[in-house]
Amino acid sequence: MENNNLVDSMRESILNDNISKIDSDSINDLLSKGLQSVRDINIPIVGCIIQISTSISDTMFMKKCLKFLKGISDIPKEKRYEFIGDLSVRNQEDAAELILSIINKLDHPQKIELICKLFKAKVFDEISIDDFIRLSFMIEKCPYIDLLYLREYEKPNYIPGSTELLSSAGLIEKTIYDFGGAEGGGCDKYSLTNLGKILLRYII
């Protein structure tokens, strides 16, 4: 999907009062009913995607965008405006373009909810804008099922498969080196990094 207006549409949508009118049924029915089922939602990103849509992936992208916008709709407009300003300055890139890129790569609806929670956390000064950026990319890297295992690393632990993925994303780190006995058989243990501890606060 390529369109010069897509970034502008997302920026305008983040600040649009109508995002409070997005309902869950419209989002959930998108794949079965198609893009035309949401054409009456008066939000810039909706009209933009409908205009340039060419495939089912565009419908799935629309679903992600609407879920994100619904998730931040209870944040005061002035706070949303302040957020995209801070994000644009800190990341030296248009905030809307970065958010579109993040949303497009997310492979699970709960990850979108996590991004919305981090958005709110930054707005209410629970985390820094740097943490928002870093955690957003960390979430994108890991399967959601492995993110759910983060709680298991509040104490040193090793879980085959999850440990490797969470470690490569920077959410856990090796804290106990176990070389085993004379015959080997050691098993290193991993614990949450500082960013892992922050993210865990927002995982259900």
Image (cartoon, rainbow, N blue to C red):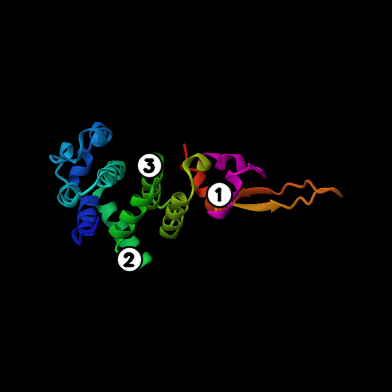
Tag 1, which secondary structure? helix
Q: Earlier in the sequence, mark 3 or mark 1?
A: 3
Return the residue at label 2: 93
Span shown in magenta: 148-169
Return the residue at label 3: 113
Tag 2, which secondary structure? loop
Return the residue at label 1: 165
Calculate the distance from the C-alpha at mark 2 to the C-alpha at mark 1: 28 Å
Q: What amino acid is found at the position of numbered circle 1 in the picture?
A: Leu
* In front of the other: 3 or 148: 3
What residue appears at the point 38 percent right and 42 percent down from the top-left corner?
113
Task: Pinpoint residue 134: horizontal percent, then vertical percent.
Answer: 46, 57
Task: Pinpoint residue 38: horizontal percent, then vertical percent.
Answer: 17, 39
Q: Is residue 43 above or below residue 132?
A: above
Q: Is residue 86 covered in magenta? A: no
Q: What amino acid is found at the position of numbered circle 2 in the picture?
A: Glu
What residue appears at the point 22 percent right and 38 percent down from the top-left corner?
22
Dot in front, 2 or 1 = 1
